[in-house]
Amino acid sequence: MLGSYIGLVEVQFYMKSALPHWFRVTWLINAPMGLLFAVRIVWEKTVWTWARGPQAVGFSLMHIHPLFAVAGVICSTLLVLWFITATIYLAGRWKICSKTEWAMVVLSLFVTLAIVLPDQFFAR
Protein backbone atom coordinates (compact mmCIF):
# COMPACT_ATOMS: atom_id res chain seq x y z
CA MET A 1 0.00 0.00 0.00
CA LEU A 2 1.38 3.39 -0.95
CA GLY A 3 1.57 5.85 1.87
CA SER A 4 3.34 6.53 5.12
CA TYR A 5 2.31 6.82 8.71
CA ILE A 6 2.52 10.13 10.56
CA GLY A 7 1.60 9.38 14.12
CA LEU A 8 -1.57 7.30 13.94
CA VAL A 9 -2.85 8.82 10.68
CA GLU A 10 -1.94 7.26 7.35
CA VAL A 11 -1.15 9.76 4.60
CA GLN A 12 -2.03 8.53 1.10
CA PHE A 13 0.18 9.38 -1.88
CA TYR A 14 -2.26 8.40 -4.62
CA MET A 15 -2.47 10.51 -7.74
CA LYS A 16 -5.97 11.75 -8.49
CA SER A 17 -6.89 9.72 -11.54
CA ALA A 18 -9.84 9.20 -13.84
CA LEU A 19 -8.60 5.78 -14.99
CA PRO A 20 -8.27 2.74 -12.74
CA HIS A 21 -4.76 1.68 -11.78
CA TRP A 22 -4.96 -1.68 -13.59
CA PHE A 23 -6.04 0.10 -16.77
CA ARG A 24 -3.01 2.40 -16.67
CA VAL A 25 -0.75 -0.62 -16.07
CA THR A 26 -2.10 -2.34 -19.19
CA TRP A 27 -1.17 0.75 -21.20
CA LEU A 28 2.30 0.76 -19.66
CA ILE A 29 2.82 -2.88 -20.64
CA ASN A 30 1.66 -2.45 -24.26
CA ALA A 31 2.94 1.05 -25.01
CA PRO A 32 6.68 0.49 -25.58
CA MET A 33 6.33 -2.21 -28.24
CA GLY A 34 3.16 -0.70 -29.71
CA LEU A 35 4.73 2.75 -30.09
CA LEU A 36 7.93 1.37 -31.66
CA PHE A 37 5.87 -0.68 -34.10
CA ALA A 38 3.69 2.34 -34.97
CA VAL A 39 6.75 4.51 -35.62
CA ARG A 40 8.19 1.84 -37.92
CA ILE A 41 4.90 1.51 -39.81
CA VAL A 42 4.59 5.29 -40.20
CA TRP A 43 8.20 5.33 -41.47
CA GLU A 44 7.35 2.72 -44.09
CA LYS A 45 4.08 4.46 -45.05
CA THR A 46 5.78 7.84 -45.52
CA VAL A 47 9.53 7.92 -46.13
CA TRP A 48 9.93 4.54 -47.81
CA THR A 49 6.85 5.07 -49.97
CA TRP A 50 8.18 8.46 -51.08
CA ALA A 51 11.69 7.12 -51.73
CA ARG A 52 10.91 3.67 -53.13
CA GLY A 53 7.40 4.01 -54.50
CA PRO A 54 4.34 1.92 -53.61
CA GLN A 55 5.11 -1.16 -51.54
CA ALA A 56 3.67 -3.72 -49.17
CA VAL A 57 3.99 -1.92 -45.85
CA GLY A 58 5.32 -4.21 -43.14
CA PHE A 59 6.57 -6.86 -45.59
CA SER A 60 10.27 -6.24 -44.93
CA LEU A 61 9.65 -5.89 -41.19
CA MET A 62 7.93 -9.27 -41.05
CA HIS A 63 10.76 -10.96 -42.93
CA ILE A 64 13.68 -9.28 -41.15
CA HIS A 65 12.30 -9.06 -37.58
CA PRO A 66 9.32 -11.43 -37.32
CA LEU A 67 9.14 -11.50 -33.50
CA PHE A 68 9.15 -7.70 -33.35
CA ALA A 69 6.45 -7.59 -36.04
CA VAL A 70 4.18 -10.09 -34.28
CA ALA A 71 4.67 -8.48 -30.86
CA GLY A 72 4.12 -5.04 -32.42
CA VAL A 73 0.89 -6.09 -34.10
CA ILE A 74 -0.44 -7.56 -30.86
CA CYS A 75 0.58 -4.58 -28.69
CA SER A 76 -0.61 -1.95 -31.16
CA THR A 77 -3.96 -3.72 -31.54
CA LEU A 78 -4.32 -3.79 -27.77
CA LEU A 79 -3.44 -0.07 -27.66
CA VAL A 80 -6.17 0.67 -30.22
CA LEU A 81 -8.67 -1.20 -28.05
CA TRP A 82 -7.26 0.61 -24.99
CA PHE A 83 -7.73 3.97 -26.76
CA ILE A 84 -11.37 3.24 -27.59
CA THR A 85 -12.12 2.09 -24.04
CA ALA A 86 -10.22 4.98 -22.42
CA THR A 87 -12.00 7.54 -24.59
CA ILE A 88 -15.37 6.18 -23.53
CA TYR A 89 -14.27 5.99 -19.91
CA LEU A 90 -12.82 9.53 -19.85
CA ALA A 91 -15.85 11.08 -21.53
CA GLY A 92 -17.62 11.09 -18.19
CA ARG A 93 -14.57 11.91 -16.06
CA TRP A 94 -12.73 14.50 -18.12
CA LYS A 95 -12.67 17.02 -15.27
CA ILE A 96 -10.42 14.87 -13.10
CA CYS A 97 -8.20 13.56 -15.93
CA SER A 98 -4.49 14.14 -15.22
CA LYS A 99 -1.86 15.28 -17.73
CA THR A 100 -0.36 11.80 -17.65
CA GLU A 101 -3.66 10.28 -18.72
CA TRP A 102 -4.03 12.83 -21.53
CA ALA A 103 -0.53 11.90 -22.72
CA MET A 104 -1.46 8.22 -22.65
CA VAL A 105 -4.57 8.92 -24.73
CA VAL A 106 -2.67 11.08 -27.25
CA LEU A 107 0.07 8.46 -27.72
CA SER A 108 -2.58 5.78 -28.15
CA LEU A 109 -4.30 8.01 -30.72
CA PHE A 110 -1.00 8.16 -32.64
CA VAL A 111 -0.81 4.36 -32.67
CA THR A 112 -4.45 4.15 -33.76
CA LEU A 113 -3.90 6.58 -36.64
CA ALA A 114 -0.70 4.81 -37.71
CA ILE A 115 -2.54 1.50 -37.94
CA VAL A 116 -5.86 2.74 -39.36
CA LEU A 117 -4.68 5.16 -42.07
CA PRO A 118 -4.47 3.51 -45.49
CA ASP A 119 -1.02 2.71 -46.86
CA GLN A 120 -1.44 5.14 -49.78
CA PHE A 121 -2.58 8.06 -47.58
CA PHE A 122 0.86 9.73 -47.69
CA ALA A 123 1.72 8.74 -51.27
CA ARG A 124 2.51 11.61 -53.58
Image (spheres, grey):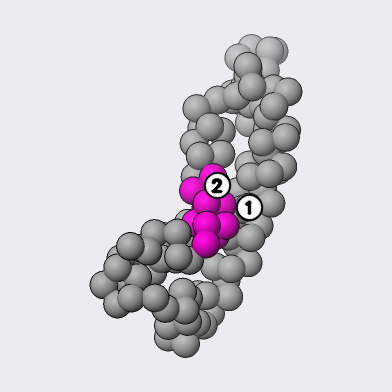
Q: Quadrant of the N terminus?
A: top right
Residue type marked 2? Ser
Residue toward you, 82 or 44: 44
Residue depicted at 67% across the width and 18% down the height: 10
Q: Quadrant of the C terminus?
A: bottom left
Q: Which mark is residue 117?
A: none
Q: Identify the residue at the far left of this view.
A: 51
Is residue 25 visible to the viewer in this orientation of the structure? no
Residue 75 x, y percent position in the rendering: 60, 62
Which segment did they paint magenta? Answer: 108-118
* Most common SS among magenta residues: helix
Q: Identify the residue at the far front of this view.
A: 124
- Residue 16 placement, left or right of 117: right
Residue depicted at 72% across the width and 35% down the height: 88
Is residue 118 visible to the viewer in this orientation of the structure? yes
Q: Which residue is mark 2?
A: 108
Q: Is residue 33 above or below residue 11?
A: below
| Disc 2 to disc 1: CB gap under 8 Å | yes
Residue type marked 1? Val
Q: Which mark is residue 80?
A: 1
Based on the picture, tell me whether residue 111 belongs to the magenta stretch. Answer: yes
Give the secondary structure at mark 1: helix
Based on the picture, tell me whether residue 74 belongs to the magenta stretch. Answer: no
Residue 113 x, y percent position in the rendering: 52, 51
Residue toward you, 96 or 48: 48
- Residue 71 placement, left or right of 37: right
Q: Quadrant of residue 16?
A: top right
Q: Quadrant of residue 12?
A: top right
Q: Is residue 6 above or below residue 2?
A: above
